[in-house]
Image (cartoon, helix red, strand yellow):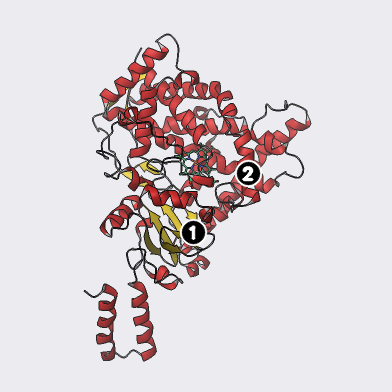
Amino acid sequence: MSSPWVDASSLLLLVLPKTAFSPILAVALIAFSVLWFCPGGLAWALSRAHSCTIRGPSGFVLALAGTAAHRVLKRLADTLKASDLMAFSVGFTRFVVASRPETAKEILNSSAFADRPIKESAYELLFHRAMGFAPFGDYWRNLRRISATYLFSPRRIAAFGERRRDIGQQMLADVQDHMAMNGVVEVKKALHFASLNNVMMSVFGKRFDYSKGEGLELEFLVKEGYELLGAFNWADHFPLLGWLDLQGVRKRCRALVKRVNAFVGSIMEEHRKRRVCGDVVAGEGDFVDVLLGMEEEEKLSDADMVAVLWEIIFRGTDTVAILLEWIMARMVLHPDIQSKAQSEIDEIVGVSRSVCDADVASLPYLHAIVKESLRLHPPGPLLSWARLAVHDVHVGDHFIPAGTTAMVNMWAITHDESIWAEPNEFMPERFIREDVSVLGSDLRLAPFGAGRRVCPGKAMGLATVHLWLAQLLQSYKWVPTEGGVDLSECLKMSLEMEKPLVCKAVPRW
Ligand code: HEM
């Protein structure tokens, strides 16, 4: 059987002589159609590897511009029997995507994929100087080391437990206010403000009272940054379009950066003044104090500090709120699972005091609920930020040229029925029967990525999700409204609920 691109180019040959096209144009058109219909599409055909063996769709894949890219890519990979590795093109950008744990592991753990491709919006928003997009090298290593020691270390996370609980208590009070005012609660609103305050406290040592209108500027900065980074920008894949900024991404990024500089810059200034007055006790400051106090040879420039701090606020806020919203949607949908988790909390904590960090380790069913939610609703189904091949490399037997963007479809892996029994069912018990780590060692469930660039905030994120879930379940019974729960998804920068969860919170005591 002839391949589709041969059919298409023969068709063109039949049509062209009858038209007024010049021979040069005819040849150009034939060449284009041949390239277009190559497996993996145009960008692969133009690369040195166009004879490569990776299966993939021809032409361009436009799924990344939509809100269900993880599902479309899984469907394509299943159809083309390319779950191990599939090649595709978006404009002039070459992609590969792994939908099996074995190839995912090879990509994420390989030093050849230790860089990230940088989108125009990320560059404009200064993220190339922050940890997530900084090229693999000394600068990036230094940032990872500093944050691992002073922000994400187990000691720091434990020391922050009481504040985390206070912020959780405030969130419970917000839920009560929403119920008193509206008779229902839009869960994400309460979660979002709590998440912002949580990150603000650990990074800036500052907390806002959103009910008094404080923190609105920060909220705008995070929301606008999310939209810009999550938006599909054609200019990233068609370089000529970059000149035109047709979607206005560059313009909006530049306006945002000015406001970020002013916001973060003023907080840094406050910290500097406190240092001059001697108000900072060594070893007790927040992360800004740590960065300002670094030795001369390690010191970051002010612009770099703004980039690093801004990224942490940005990354740390919505992932936690989005994951908890999915978990609460599941709790409303599965009352039996909800009450089992509540019984566990009641048994361990009792009814006379509120749950705290120290209790969390004794709540295995709660942990299983979080794992099962990460499996069914991974906040980064394509692991959010892809990897870039820094040099030519092989994945399995396949040659991948330098400059190829590599993605892992974690959503496809966590919904693969050859790996998970009844993959579409919410069954936390599966993790009671088998203890699977979510931290990156087992690629069947690696929602925080793996390898050198694994999420550095995973322990902090999980500590927050576990404690706040326990607090939410201990205090309220969560029941549906007449509208029920709609589990439709929408992939922006993270995988969000398309229709925010609105439900009722009934006090348990
Ligand atoms: C539920 C919570 C979270 C999820 C699901 C999540 C997920 C991820 C994923 C999938 C990656 C890419 C990993 C890879 O390429 O292998 C990542 C990277 C990153 N995350 Fe998270 N994350 C979460 C919470 C946080 C928090 C709380 C922070 C900080 C406060 C954070 C900061 C970062 C940073 C800085 C990177 C880039 C690391 C690098 O490139 O070196 N994340 N995260």
Q: Position of residue 133 (x, y in %)?
A: 55, 51
Extreme residue in the top direction: 352
The part of the image, by quadrant, that contains residue 278 is top right
Q: Is residue 444 above or below residue 96?
A: above
Residue lying at 70% horizontally and 34% vertically, measured from the top left = 271
Q: Nearer the viewer, residue 420 or 168?
A: 420
Q: Secondary structure at mark 1?
A: loop
Picture coordinates of residue 74 (x, y %)?
31, 52
Decide which of 422, 322 is in the foreground and name it: 422
Name the residue tied to disc 2: 143
The outermost residue toward the front is 397
In depth, the one of 107 and 294 nearer the eye is: 107
Residue identifier under label 1: 248
The picture places residue 311, in percent across and down from the top left corner, at 56, 44
Asked where in the image residue 143 lies, by quadrant, the reply is top right
Q: Tag on residue 150? A: none
| Residue 314 shown left or right of residue 277 in the figure | left
Q: How many marks?
A: 2
Question: Residue 456 at x, y = what percent?
Answer: 54, 39
Q: Are marks 2 and 1 in contact (CB under 8 Å)?
A: no
Asked whether mark 1 and ligand 1 are closer than 8 Å, the reply comes as no
Residue 294 located left or right of residue 169: right
Task: Give me the residue at 60% from left, 30% from top.
Answer: 206
Neighbourhood count class around disc 2 (C-alpha, 10 Å): few under 14, some 14–19, many 20 upward: some
Residue 172 in sight here: yes
Query: Label 1 sits on what residue type?
Result: Gly
Q: Is residue 109 above or below residue 208?
A: below
Task: Look at discs 2 and 1 and give the one toward the viewer.
Answer: 2
Mark 2 to mark 1 CA distance (whole Å): 31 Å
Q: Is mark 2 within 8 Å of ligand 1?
A: yes
